[in-house]
Amino acid sequence: MGDNKSPSGSPKENPDNDSDANPLARDDSSLETIVRKFQDSMSLKKHKFWETQPVGQFKEVGDSSLPEGPIEPPTPLSEVKQEPYNLPSAYEWTTCDMDSEETCLEVYNLLKNNYVEDDENMFRFNYSKEFLRWALRPPSYFRSWHIGVRAKSSKKLVAFITGVPARIRVRDEVVRMAEINFLCVHKKLRSKRLAPVMIKEVTRRVHLENIWQAAYTAGVVLPTPITTCQYWHRSLNPKKLIDVGFSRLGARMTMSRTIKLYKLPDSPVTPGFRKMELRDVPAVTRLLRNYLSQFVVAPDFDEDDVEHWLLPSENVVDSYLVESPETHEITDFCSFYTLPSSILGNQTYSTLKAAYSYYNVSTKTPLLQLMNDALIVAKQKDYDVFNALDVMQNESFLKELKFGPGDGQLHYYLYNYRIRRELKPSELGLVLL
Ligand SMILES: CC(C)(COP(=O)(O)OP(=O)(O)OC[C@H]1O[C@@H](n2cnc3c(N)ncnc32)[C@H](O)[C@@H]1OP(=O)(O)O)[C@@H](O)C(=O)NCCC(=O)NCCS
């Protein structure tokens, strides 16, 4: 079959995979678009905001004399600006209390209508309220890092940005960081330079907690990615994916051959494969810590983190493990999170149910077999597609398990931390939501 769509940093198969696809056939041939795409690809674009920030700059790429580590030292907390940055006068800051059903619904609706879309505006991420609560309230989170902007007159929520604390290891150094996510500006307020103000404000609030580094991802190229990853998509419900334009029927393929190609067994094949439970937290933590130690950049998870991020939570995160039927040892682990996308303008279907590969560890069961079991349970649970980045050891199973490449790239960034050279996706052990 053809290719999949990925929202700029996620959902869909790649139409340019087809040798006969004309990249200029879509309405993207304006001179401005061509120039932008060229500048993007050559990293020549001016970044008025990002050029002022402590991030790796394009002009430094390849300069191996620069030291790895923090770009700027921390400043005394008393020198951190105490008042919020100025917003245009019609707008005001708000801290979003995600415990509040009402606020959570406002955030949900802002993102549902204005968050990330694929390049052709066919799909838009539709993070659930439960997912947002989970993503934003990990151990020791700061409520002050859940930042909204409201219109003063109507009190309508029009922009959002968040941070959550994390310990991230870069080579031998465990660094306290903020993971920045859910940057969103209402469609009607775009291109007014609101995003830089939001980024500066979250940075200020992170600094107030004596944290000086951050990690984030984006579908756009900014100064300077530590690595660039690609999404891969494994069809579970090929007919629906083709009907909604997520993927295309491959050359010389019929629908019935395609359905047969993606068929999976009814239940997992690995003996001892079962859902993770609370009692498994210590064993999973050991397994995961040991596994992640091989990557250049990876989270430093303790048991509290594992309980929060990996204990199954309905329609949010699913985790399975292999318990040896003989020794009862926990030998393997796999997980995925649930992130549906709204299907924009389809008469028949309104949502695409997508599973995203999260953290997977194999010590006894071959990774290929473990991930095939993950596909099987995702199919049982009625997901339409299973997505995975080419991070960690994922390349070893993508092609064989019939994943196809997506059309979006996901760039990973660190704020105020320089990496000597660009990493390969397989050197990255971090999945951000
Ligand atoms: C991303 C978004 C908030 C940017 O807002 P905008 O109104 O388009 O852009 P603004 O005029 O406010 O700001 C432009 C600046 O923000 C930067 N910027 C844009 N998207 C960014 C991102 N995802 N992460 C960090 N910086 C970003 C731009 O590079 C530019 O800075 P530069 O001149 O140094 O290059 C907005 O387009 C949006 O909500 N998009 C949909 C959701 C989305 O893609 N969110 C980001 C997910 S990673």
Image (cartoon, grey):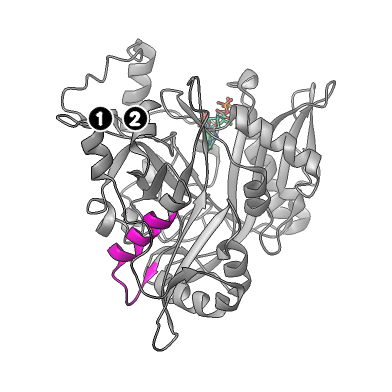
In which quadrant of the rendered view does residue 183 lie?
A: top right
Question: Is residue 80 or residue 305 the one in the foreground?
Answer: 305
Q: CB of mark 2 within 8 Å of CB of mark 1?
A: yes
Spot occupied by residue 315 in the image (x, y as percentages of width and height):
58, 51
In which quadrant of the rendered view does residue 33 lie?
A: top left
Query: What is the chief secondary structure element of the magenta stretch?
Result: helix
* SS assignment at label 1: loop
In reply to whether residue 221 is colored magenta, the answer given is no
Near mark 1 (Cα within 10 A), the count class, few <14, some 14-19 or many ≥20, is some
Residue displayed at 36% across by 61% down: 373
In reply to whether residue 367 is colored magenta, the answer given is yes
Question: Callout 2, which amino acid?
Answer: Ile
Q: Which residue is mark 1?
A: 249
100 relative to 403 in the view: left or right: right
Instruction: Provide the residue span drawn in magenta.
Output: 361-377
Spot occupied by residue 311 in the image (x, y as percentages of width and height):
58, 65
Q: Earlier in the sequence, mark 2 or mark 1?
A: 2
Spot occupied by residue 308 in the image (x, y as percentages of width and height):
62, 64
Near mark 2 (Cα within 10 A), the count class, few <14, some 14-19 or many ≥20, is some
Ligand 1 located in image quadrant: top right
Residue displayed at 17% across by 29% down: 251
Q: Is residue 284 visible?
A: yes
How much space separates mark 2 and mark 1, taking CA atoms? 7 Å
Question: Callout 1, which amino acid?
Answer: Leu
Q: Is residue 86 visible?
A: no
Question: Is residue 278 or residue 78 the one in the foreground?
Answer: 278
Q: Residue furthest bottom?
A: 327
217 relative to 188 in the view: left or right: left
* SS assignment at label 2: helix
Q: Which residue is mark 2?
A: 242
- Could you tell me which quadrant the N terminus lies in? top left
Question: Is residue 376 or residue 414 the one in the foreground?
Answer: 376
